Each structure stands twice: as structure tokens, then as C-alpha cells.
Image: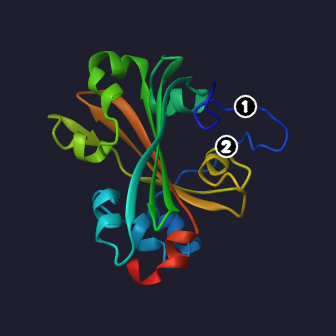
Amino acid sequence: MTLPAANASRRSGQSTAEPAWVSLETGASRAPAALVPWLAEPGLLTARVRAAGGGTKQFRMLRLQASPLSGALQTRLAVADRAGLVREIEFACDGVRWIYAQSVFPDSTVARYPWLRNLGESPLGEALRRVADTVREPLEYAELPADHELARVAQPAGGGPLWARRAVYRLAGAPIIVQEVFLPALIQARPEAT
């Protein structure tokens, strides 16, 4: 099975255009004010979700599987790999998804770091802290239209546009990308948590 967010498809009703990924300074004026602190979070989202007030927090891996890489991801990661592993997780509070995250590990990176296959329920960000010579490139931000492939995976029931951020990490030069999509429940259910 091919994961839609990793492999751009041309099914009817699905946006095939890649959104403009920009700096926070460029995009923040369009984002909901209550979401900006989450978008701007310099540390791990895992830690921020755990620190958010009230409720039962849950980190859950949804899926890990091989998938073709879209041309846009190959270009952004500067790899020739045609496939890789796609890992999907969610951060939820009281059973409601707050953040959907997708990590893409090109085959060449997995060959050098096979432990990426075996993260299980462990947060990726915490695992990367233990890898020497890991560099995170600057965060990029985009407002995803509701029909964009990543928005559709993050919010299967549909809805409006969603804000996302992404970062490329280079593990001694070997790239991975982490894309995080922020759901409306994050600021609607607990605005004080922002």
C-alpha cells in the first residue's frame, strides 16, 4: 500500500501542487494567533504536548511502512532514492488528535541508520538527540489546503486548511524529513495550553 502523503498521486479531488513552504516570519501573519507559539516551538513538540495543561496525553505510532518518495521530497532531501520508510504518529489529548506527524526516511538513510526501523513508540526527536553530528535545517511552514495529501492524512474526516511545519535533519549528512500538521483541536480544546 502506498501512503498518500509520501507519494503524490493525481486522484481527483486531491491537490497535486506543493504548497509554498516559507519561514515563520513570512507565514506567521496568516496563522491563527493561538497557533503561532506551537509553530514557533524551538524544542521538541513531544515535550510541549506533555507540558500542556490538563487531560490525558497520548503519543501513538499509527504506521511505519515502505513507500515511494514523491519527486518533491526527493528534491527537498537532495536524494536519488525512489523509496523510503514513512512513519506516522499522532499526539492526542483525551483521545482527540492535536498533532499529526509524518517522518520520511529515504532508503539510503535507513541503510546507514537501521535503528530508524525499530523506533516503535519512541519519539523520534528524543532518539535524534542521541545521534552525534545531527543537524536540523531551518523550520519551514505552510498552510495546507484541505485537499492537500498531507492535510487529508492528518484530518481524514475533512475540514478546512491546516498549518504545518517541517524540518530536514541530516544525520552525518544522511537526510530525513519530519512534517508536523497542527489540528484545530489543539487550540480549540485547550487554548490555555498554547
As displayed, is residue 117 above or below residue 42?
above
* Percent position of residue 117, x then y: 35, 26
Q: Which residue lies at the image location 55% right of the left edge and 70% below the top edge? A: 185
Is label 2 in contact with label 1 (beta carbons under 8 Å)? yes
* Percent position of residue 122, x then y: 29, 43
Q: Tell me the quadrant of the picture where the N terminus can be found.
A: top right
- Dot placed on the residue nearer the N-terminal end, 2 or 1: 1
Question: Which amino acid lies under the numbered mark 2 shown in the image of this protein?
Answer: Glu
* Percent position of residue 102, x then y: 48, 42
Identify the image quadrant of residue 12: top right
Q: Which residue lies at the image location 47% right of the left edge and 82% below the top edge? A: 191
Q: Horizontal placement of 71 versus 64: left or right?
A: right
For label 1, the residue is 9
Identify the image quadrant of residue 25: bottom left
Which type of secondary structure does the marked residue at label 2 adopt? helix
For label 2, the residue is 149
As displayed, is residue 132 above or below residue 53?
above
* Percent position of residue 128, x then y: 24, 40
**Disc number at residue 18?**
none
Q: Horizontal placement of 63 versus 45: left or right?
A: right
